[in-house]
Image: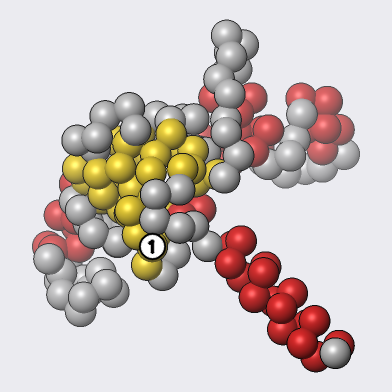
Amino acid sequence: MKKSFFICSILLVASCAFAKVGDSRYVAVQGAEVKVKASSFAKSTGSLKYAEEVEIVSENNGWTEVMSKENPKVKGWISSSALSKRKIVSSSFSASANELALAGKGFSDSIEGEYKKNSNTNYAAVDAMEKQSVKASDVRKFMVDGMLNTGDTGTTK
């Protein structure tokens, strides 16, 4: 009896963990790039906004193929970790990029202040690093020029 209950419990949890085709999810990151295939280095076909609702088309190894409910022409792959089951409600409240970064780390201004007061950590270097960005097209060019393997198909294309 205990064994069958345990197996049923695992099956129930597993079925809840995976999205089903047609389910809705919400973009939980700022500016998620939609890719032509399930790879960080694939070409981008568009982007999705924070809190935008998408429909699940399929899933593959940590990637989810989605279609925007707002603009069905935007269809492709994004990292499954960029999606939330819970509806994200946007408000008129605005936060700076710094405040969003702190919130994502579980920090508030007062908690960060305590860390700065009690630590010799160079937060200016961390802040400068967070401001860095590299275009996906530049990363692809770097990989092709350097003949690096993307890891998704065994080729640099």
Viewer-side residue, 152 vs 127: 152
Viewer-side residue, 126 vs 93: 93
Q: Quadrant of residue 47?
A: top left
- Residue at the spot x=61%, y=61% of the render? 16
Q: Where is residue 138 shown, x and y percent of the image? A: 20, 47
* Horizontal side of residue 125 vs 115, given as left or right: left
Q: Where is residue 79 shown, x and y percent of the image? A: 41, 54
Q: Where is residue 66 shown, x and y percent of the image? A: 34, 48
* Horizontal side of residue 108 vs 102, given as left or right: right
Answer few, some or many: residues within 10 Å of disc 1's Cα (few below 14, many 20 plus, some between 14 and 19): some
Q: Quadrant of the N terminus?
A: bottom right
**Is residue 82 visible in the rendered structure shown here?**
no
- Residue at the spot x=51%, y=53% of the render? 81
- When the figure is inspected, residue 101 is found, relative to residue 134, above or below; the finding is above
- Residue at the spot x=15%, y=69% of the render? 156
**Is residue 45 visible in the rendered structure shown here?**
yes
Q: Quadrant of the C terminus?
A: bottom left
Q: Seen from this angle, which residue lies furthest front?
A: 1
Q: Mark 1 points at which residue?
A: 59
> The disc labelled 1 sits on which kind of residue?
Glu
Total labels drawn: 1
